[in-house]
């Protein structure tokens, strides 16, 4: 076990409120200035299926979960069996002695198995089964010798709307667990964390960050159909729709959502939709319409493992190539895959600017891991975020126009845009191939011009694609490449490798399409050895890089079992190929 | 007030000679004029089909979208700026075939959209396949041995689905059509106008004379027709065959979807200032 | 005859304790048994939702498809082999939300499918958003300030769209449910069974007691209810509130889609020999 | 002008029946054993918009249209202006002197402008305007001194169901045109073709060939929603549904079509859908379901230029990459792009075998050019086409099974398949990730196994992918690459280049995905210089080749104006880069 850091996991089954309890625990620490990372695991069922939630707390910055647990709380027997191998040699398993029986099973050496009568305590309190979590968390706090006051405060806040009785019951439960461990397992108690680590930190998910970025960007309409892992964006923004004067529409399907968003953008309002791969599949047709009509649009795609329904509540990075070439015909689009919550916030804001500036679809590619994991921020930094609506004409500019052409051919391919209600900007936006005015174009030469006009945006878009970022030492024995949410585990791996004397660095891509070819090629060519880390089967970014640059990444570590990467796997692979 | 002539654009339609769409286009321009709409505050939204070409021939804003998706695009526009009058133009295939689900849901939502369905009982632009309103037995390219499905009855369906204005017109009864259309444009809520439109090229069954012989105006019936009773409207809507009723079957006043959004009370979304949204208060909820 | 017990599979559902789906599953197995269906000649088709998991718990053939597409898959199976009994299992979101268009068209087509809609007035599997049947004002994760749309009335809609068997049941009235379901399974044509199914986790409004207080059986009404008159059924279908009618609203006998295909007269498509199709006669038409 | 070959074009406007008339003309020749190629140009309108139809007839094999017209028939003034530049220096323009006035316009030297009073003749006959085509065709036959008897026969057949009066009227019209030219332009008349060239030949479109291939393959259900250029498949098979006992369903939309086809295949029936890019966009979600549930399915995608509605009645090759990566997640699929009608027939047949053999989606990629152009066949060759239903279990085989597992893990990744109605094969097919039985799989190790199982099919699929075919000399100065329908124009170009002493060959790909990497790499590496000919903007196959092999094609000729390639453009490009 490390000092100044604790890794915790609670395991039971769906419907036991593990995520909520662990979040309360996390806030106990982040409010005291600790860094934290919370990872959820949701089975595809509302109840009963095995599941867990893990939390890592540290005095210093952390970017991912770890594979080692210091303390496991087990609410079911099979939770012990499934996860005891992850517990560190000097770790603990707190289990409900009334519900869990690890005795007959093979126990692992070194680990302390600490029975606590969670069910009996709950029964005595006449409390519902769910309260076992709180009792166990009390026990956990005792074990690491951390004062329960902060947690009590949170319990009071969270349960406030359920009434005082419930608040008190939960606080008693926490105390009961705390006292039980103090009284029975005193010898194991050891202080792991200081009581404080600085000013309170924000704690939020990728979805939260994305929602905030959209609100900040002036998104005024969100139309979506629920789909894991994007639904929380719908829920969150809906909860704020009156505060920020946003219309949130749960539509009849994803087709309607996408078309509505296009309609709203056409009418001059920043609008977005969010979904997962399956819902995006239904948006593919309208995506092309946005492109042909040059209507800005922002679409969030939260990846989960496919094909098809696949594993709806797990994670993966299987949709990059799908997004690059989705929809019939060819057109410029922008794909951004933020690597962490901060990037998610900032790049979502930016996505709206880019969409309006270039009048192209902008796709934000996240995944369940990024979308639903919580990380900490010291504070909100948004002063530098400035709205840029591109070539949106004012009434004054329009009144100077003799003969307004919505699809005017310009040197940068971007045509000045009018919106309905503007006196002088009347036009027809269309999904057909068209001339500068929007009228049907079938003349081959004219068609070519208009196709060229749309693609004329590419070099200008490329200029605004942020270059891949290099993390770690400039000179390294091996260069890792990764995109989107894989950033966190790789950063942690770099640190571990450095500790072992291996100089590795990371080229991380957030702006994926159009691929920032020049900068990327330079970085790859400079590398001694390269390895791509991707959450899919075929190595999609590696393929895209080869397609665009001809460069072949030397090695590749893929993962497609529904789980995020763990730093240890990355370290192991690096050592294997070195 | 804008005149129908002022609504003409520089382009001429290339519909077949005698196509009912010409009449619809004229009626539409007249009704826009009659209803006192302003061109820059009016948006025509269409899908794909012969009917989908309307926006190019009316000097208002226009969005020519994809097949079947007229209503969600129209809804997006209307939610973005409810000062705009939004008119949907769709074919029967577009509206009741591929677009049937949006039809259902937009009606119960009661978004203020005037929905003109150019119902020629055939797929025109794709050169003559069965449409959802084609009568049973009708032989087309996709059903050479005759359609074996019951046709959709758009009027019944709209009444059942909760539309607040439900009308059927025949483009051959031009003045009646114009008048109902004007009324629909003035309706505060979703208005369906199912327009019987002969397709002279691919539908040789439901022709002008065929309709002329059959249509009658609801208000001409003995006792007239008060379009206020949903059940009566539904019963009347069942009639199709030797006699075909046209006119307003049903109308009711109800808050629109937009009316029920406090976010839109002060001003349309499109007019709201987004230059510096302050999220600092919200952010503190993440501590 | 297969017994309900023989229809059990090795898997147990993980629905929430008290979920209406348990009752539906039991009812379904009983009705399959009662209707004398053979497991290998029965196919359960589902979409995605809590309800979509049914096929895994009934020992018949099953196809667990994607969200909203139960009916086209079911239609494909039925057209491929009309000796099979095809049962669709969908949630209210699946059936009336994303799948609304297939619902409309499959009904007018009258394909022989028994359609069990698990109507819990909520999106269960995605943890509680508004469904098309959620009542106005219902606050959910996607409508925290209350839904502002009129709900879909599946029974009205089905009657308007031409379904040949339209029923509503409440899973809490178990025997009545089983009996109606058995009747539906025996219907030669499309049969809608809208099942009022409490979702104990996300819908705290439409609970067992809420329904118990309100539902009444159509046949228990003074004068009873003969499900033969479309208009009467439609009028009855409007009732929803203090009193909620359950039972068979409407039933009629009509040729199914399959009946009207001479291609299927001799044998199902699946049984036709394709080992050597001779196209030489046809080819000569290209000279 | 060449001897033994004539290139003809008729130009007017939509609704004038140009295609039908030209087809009648074509059959006049193919029945006498000539080779022919008929190209249509349809505007996106039922009436009025300018359009044309062209026909090339030859005594020897031809594979495409040419850019040079020998005889242009102009029914409108603008038809002269638009197309006179295409007429060869010693060519003719027959125009309706009552409707067309090329006099005031710039006329081109060498070309003979031959006024014929088409309208007046039609008026005298009290015939409808449409009869002008027939009169003009009569004139054309006179000009090339070809006996009109064959054409009369065809007229008699085609108009038979309209009654004798119409037949006679049309025959008179043909004679009138014939006589007029004979009487007035005798000096220009020259025999261009022999009267006969062998036994009657078949004349059919790519869509016809595809439909025949599907019928031959035992396709029993076609579910589709009309969309250009795939609708004729729907129409044709519908017209044969009773003869061949096929159920043809015009569905409510493409989503229904695809799902129905999957349902039917699941139930043991070969079923197909056909559409274009826009409709395919709506099928993308269900495509993944076919893959995850391992249900065979055949989908025809007829390309037309996008994005979105684009140019619905024109041609292009913009959907290759879209098809390769369509749908969330990753899965094996097969993409076949036949190069001509013969390949279309044979590969459509094969597609059904492959779909069942590998239990994967098979996509047949055509385009408007291939789908709607007519070419000739000497006869039907189908004796060697054998149905292979793969691992479809018989009742007998199933009854031996103890515990049938639909998704059994096998060495080739293919699991034996049962279908409903089989006593012992009860199972659930599913869109979720699953174990061997079809039950939900969320265990990471199990998920990986099943993902691996599906991809285990790849090497076996690859073995059945036909290798790219080399046309032309083995040793060449330059190697052209092309896929799908571009084959014809390139073959013609090769011939012309050879005549000019340039040794060029063609590597043509029909089996595109999985890419036959080995054979292809060999061919590219052996080439002195390579040039890719593609009907899109970005050079999609070139990109795919680079992605899969790292090889960069030296040059690329793209076209994205809605028109097919013409041999002359290809020759010009070859000379440019040599
Ligand atoms: C997704 C999609 N599928 C198919 C088409 C092809 N398509 C264009 S118009 C049309 C139908 C036209 O019928 P209708 O809507 O009744 O309009 P009409 O031409 O009769 O006015 C179809 C199927 C398309 N554009 N998009
Ligand atoms: C195309 C698509 N969009 C969204 C989803 C996510 N999703 C899964 S189940 C479901 C809704 C469930 O509600 P309902 O159909 O009423 O079934 P219930 O769970 O209530 O039984 C949704 C939206 C999906 N699977 N596919
Ligand atoms: S095809 Fe029919 S609907 Fe289309 S323009 Fe011609 S007559 Fe009108
Ligand atoms: S969430 Fe609702 S519908 Fe789903 S299993 Fe639980 S109680 Fe049943
Ligand atoms: Mg129509
Ligand atoms: Mg539900």
Image (spheres, coloured by chain):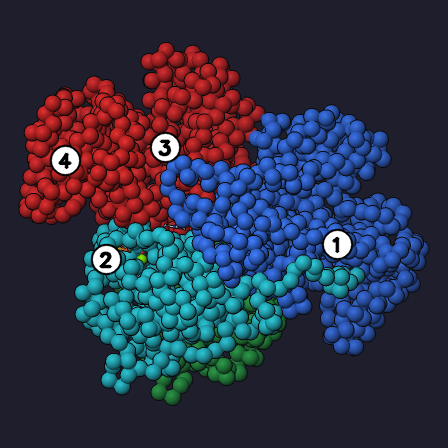
Chain colours: A blue, B cyan, C green, D red
Mark 2 and ligand 3: say if the CB distance to the nearest ligand atom is below 8 Å: yes
Residue A465 visible to the viewer: yes
Q: Which residue is mark 1?
A: A382
Secondary element at tag 4: strand
Q: Which mark is residue D564?
A: 3
Image coordinates of residue A576 in percent, x first then y, are: 73, 29
How many marks are shown on the rendered structure? 4
**Chain letter of the residue carrying label 3:** D
**Chain letter of the residue carrying label 2:** B
Secondary element at tag 2: loop
User: What residue is drawn where x is 63% and y is 27%?
Assistant: A552
Q: Which of the marked residues, 4 or 3, is nearer the chain's N terminus?
A: 4
Judge by depth and name the residue closer to the eye, A220 or A132: A220
Report, in whole angstroms, how far the alpha carbon at label 1 lies from the one at label 4: 76 Å
Image coordinates of residue D416 in percent, x first then y, are: 45, 40
Report if the CB atoms under discs 2 and 1 are less than 8 Å apart: no
User: What residue is drawn where x is 40% and y is 21%?
Assistant: D572
Q: Which mark is residue C100?
A: none
Secondary element at tag 3: loop
Q: Which mark is residue D116?
A: 4
Report, in whole angstroms, how far the alpha carbon at label 2 lies from the one at label 1: 61 Å
Residue A307 visible to the viewer: no
Q: Residues within 10 Å of mark 2 (few under 14, many from 20)?
A: few
Q: Is residue A145 above or below residue A123?
A: above
Report, in whole angstroms, how far the alpha carbon at label 2 lies from the one at label 4: 29 Å
Please check whether the numbered discs 4 and 3 fall on a single chain.
Answer: yes
User: What residue is drawn where x is 39% and y is 31%?
Assistant: D484
Q: Residues within 10 Å of mark 3 (few under 14, many from 20)?
A: many
**Chain letter of the residue carrying label 4:** D
Q: Is residue D235 above or below residue A77?
A: above
Quadrant where the image shows the N terminus of chain D: top left
Image coordinates of residue D381 in percent, x first then y, are: 26, 28
């Amino acid at each position: 076990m490390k000092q100044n850091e604790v890794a915790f996991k609670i395991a039971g089954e769906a419907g036991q409120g593990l995520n909520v309890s662990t979040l309360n625990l996390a806030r106990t620490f982040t409010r005291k200035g600790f860094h934290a990372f919370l990872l959820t695991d949701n089975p595809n069922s509302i109840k009963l299926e095995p599941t867990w939630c893990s939390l890592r707390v540290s005095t210093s910055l952390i970017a991912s979960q770890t594979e080692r647990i210091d303390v496991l709380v087990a609410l079911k027997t099979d939770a012990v069996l499934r996860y005891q191998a992850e517990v560190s040699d000097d770790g603990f398993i707190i289990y409900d002695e009334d519900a869990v029986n690890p005795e007959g099973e093979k126990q692992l050496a070194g680990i302390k198995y600490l029975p606590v009568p969670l069910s009996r305590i709950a029964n005595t309190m006449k409390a519902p089964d769910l309260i076992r979590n709180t009792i166990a968390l009390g026990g956990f706090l005792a074990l690491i010798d951390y004062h329960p006051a902060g947690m009590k405060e949170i319990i009071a806040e969270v349960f406030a709307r359920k009434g005082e009785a419930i608040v008190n019951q939960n606080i008693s439960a926490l105390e009961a667990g705390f006292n039980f461990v103090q009284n029975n397992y005193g010898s194991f108690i050891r202080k792991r964390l200081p009581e404080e680590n600085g000013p309170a930190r924000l704690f939020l998910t990728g979805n939260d960050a994305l929602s905030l970025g959209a609100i900040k960007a002036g998104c005024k309409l969100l139309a979506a159909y629920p789909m894991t892992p994007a639904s929380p964006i719908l829920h969150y923004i809906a909860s704020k729709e009156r505060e920020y004067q946003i219309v949130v529409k749960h539509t009849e399907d994803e087709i309607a959502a996408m078309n509505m968003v296009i309609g709203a953008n056409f009418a001059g309002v920043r609008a977005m939709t969010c979904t997962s791969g399956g819902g995006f599949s239904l948006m593919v047709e309208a995506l092309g319409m946005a492109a042909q009509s040059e209507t800005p649009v922002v679409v969030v795609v939260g990846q989960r493992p496919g094909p098809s329904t696949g594993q709806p509540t797990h994670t993966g990075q299987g949709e990059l190539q799908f997004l690059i070439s989705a929809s019939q015909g060819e057109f410029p689009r922008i794909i951004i895959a933020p690597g962490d919550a901060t990037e998610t916030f900032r790049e979502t804001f930016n996505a709206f600017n880019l969409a309006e500036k270039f009048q192209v679809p902008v796709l934000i590619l996240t995944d369940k891991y990024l979308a639903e994991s919580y990380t900490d921020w010291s504070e909100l930094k948004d002063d530098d975020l400035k709205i840029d609506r591109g070539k949106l004409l004012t009434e004054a500019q329009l009144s100077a126009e003799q003969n307004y052409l919505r699809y005017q051919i310009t040197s940068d391919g971007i045509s000045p845009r009018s919106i309905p209600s503007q006196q002088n900007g009347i036009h027809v936006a269309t999904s057909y191939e068209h001339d500068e005015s929007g009228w049907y174009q079938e003349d081959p030469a004219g068609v070519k011009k208009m196709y060229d006009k749309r693609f004329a945006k590419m070099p200008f878009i490329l200029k605004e694609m942020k270059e891949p970022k290099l993390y770690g030492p400039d000179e390294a024995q091996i260069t890792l490449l990764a995109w989107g949410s894989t950033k966190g585990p790789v950063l942690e791996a770099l640190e571990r490798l450095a500790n072992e004397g291996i100089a590795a660095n990371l080229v991380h891509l957030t702006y994926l399409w159009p691929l920032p070819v020049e900068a990327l090629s330079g970085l790859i060519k400079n590398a001694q050895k390269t390895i791509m880390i991707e959450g899919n089967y075929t190595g999609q970014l590696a393929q895209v890089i080869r397609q665009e640059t001809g460069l072949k990444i030397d090695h590749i570590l893929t993962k497609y079992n529904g789980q995020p990467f763990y730093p240890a796997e990355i370290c192991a692979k690096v050592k294997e190929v070195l | 007030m804008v005149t129908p002539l002022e609504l003409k654009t520089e382009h001429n339609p290339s519909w077949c000679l005698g196509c009912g769409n010409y009449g619809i286009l004229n009626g539409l321009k007249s009704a826009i004029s009659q209803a006192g709409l302003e061109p820059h505050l009016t948006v025509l939204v269409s899908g794909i089909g012969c009917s989908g070409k309307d926006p190019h021939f009316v000097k208002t804003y226009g969005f020519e979208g994809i097949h079947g998706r007229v209503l969600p695009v129209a809804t997006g526009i209307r939610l973005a700026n409810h000062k705009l009058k939004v008119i949907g133009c769709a074919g029967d295939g577009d509206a009741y075939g591929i677009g049937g689900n949006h039809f259902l849901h937009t009606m119960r939502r009661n978004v203020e959209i005037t929905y003109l369905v150019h119902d020629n009982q055939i797929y025109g632009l794709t050169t003559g396949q069965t449409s959802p309103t084609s009568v049973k037995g009708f032989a087309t390219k996709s059903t050479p041995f005759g359609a074996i499905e019951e046709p959709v009855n758009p009027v019944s369906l709209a009444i059942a689905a909760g539309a607040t204005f439900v009308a059927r017109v025949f483009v051959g009864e031009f003045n009646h059509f114009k008048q109902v259309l004007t009324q629909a444009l003035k309706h505060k809520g979703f208005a369906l106008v199912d327009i019987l439109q002969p397709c002279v090229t691919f539908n040789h069954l439901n022709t002008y004379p065929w309709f002329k012989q059959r249509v009658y105006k609801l208000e001409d019936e003995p006792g007239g027709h008060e379009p206020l009773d949903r059940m009566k409207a539904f019963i009347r809507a069942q009639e199709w065959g030797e006699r075909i009723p046209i006119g307003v079957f049903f109308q009711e006043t109800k808050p629109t979807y937009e009316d029920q959004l406090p976010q839109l009370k002060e001003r349309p979304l499109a007019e709201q200032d987004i230059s510096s949204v302050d999220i600092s208060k919200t952010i503190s909820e993440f501590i």
